[in-house]
Image (spheres, rainbow, N blue to C red):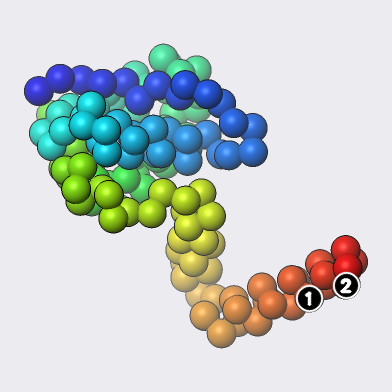
Amino acid sequence: MHVVAPAITQVTPRMLLWIQIRNRIIFLIRSGRLTEGDRLPSVREVAVKQNVNFNTVAKAYKDLERDGLIQTKRGSGTFVSSTAQQVGALSDSPLDVLIDELLESADSRGIGDDQLLFQIQRRLEARRANHG
C-alpha cells in the first residue's frame, strides 16, 4: 500500500478545482497508479500541498466517496475502494458532474424534476433569443 498525492498537473481555469482533483484521482485509478486499498493523503495534506481551500478538496473526496471510488475509515484515513475496471465505466465528464450537482441541489431545496426541467428550458429559450 502506498500513498499518492493527487497532484493537479495543469490548472484549467474553465474547470472547477474540485473537479480537477476528482478527475486526477480517477485518472490515477484508471492508469493503475492507485489500486484498491491504497491510502490517499488527507484532505488537509492535499489542500496544503496544492495550495487550495480545504473545502475544495473535501468536496472532491466527498464526490468520489459518493461514487464508491474511495472510502474514508475514521481514524485510519481514506482509501481507494475501486479497481480500474470499475472506474472505467464511470463518466468523469465535467458536465455530468455539474448536472449531478444541480440535481442534488434542486432536491435539497425541494425543487421537483418537472419544475427544474421547465426552468432550464425557459432559460435556454431566453439564451437562444438573446444570442440567436
* Helix, strand or loop for disc 2: helix
Residue 2 location, x and y as percent? 15, 20
The quadrant the N terminus occupies is: top left
Find disc 1 in the rendering and name its residue: 125
Q: Residue at x 27, y 38 (%)?
A: 30
Q: Residue at x 45, y 24 (%)?
A: 8
Instruction: Answer left or right for 43 relative to 75.
Output: right
Q: Residue at x 38, y 54 (%)?
A: 91
The quadrant the C terminus occupies is: bottom right
* Helix, strand or loop for disc 1: helix
The amino acid on which the numbered mark 1 sits, given as a three-letter code, is: Glu
Residue 110 location, x and y as percent? 51, 75
Residue 80 location, x and y as percent? 19, 37
Q: Is residue 75 visible?
A: no
Q: Residue furthest top?
A: 49
Find disc 2 in the rendering and name its residue: 129
The amino acid on which the numbered mark 2 sits, given as a three-letter code, is: Ala
Q: Is residue 120 above or below residue 40?
A: below
Residue 15 location, x and y as percent? 58, 39
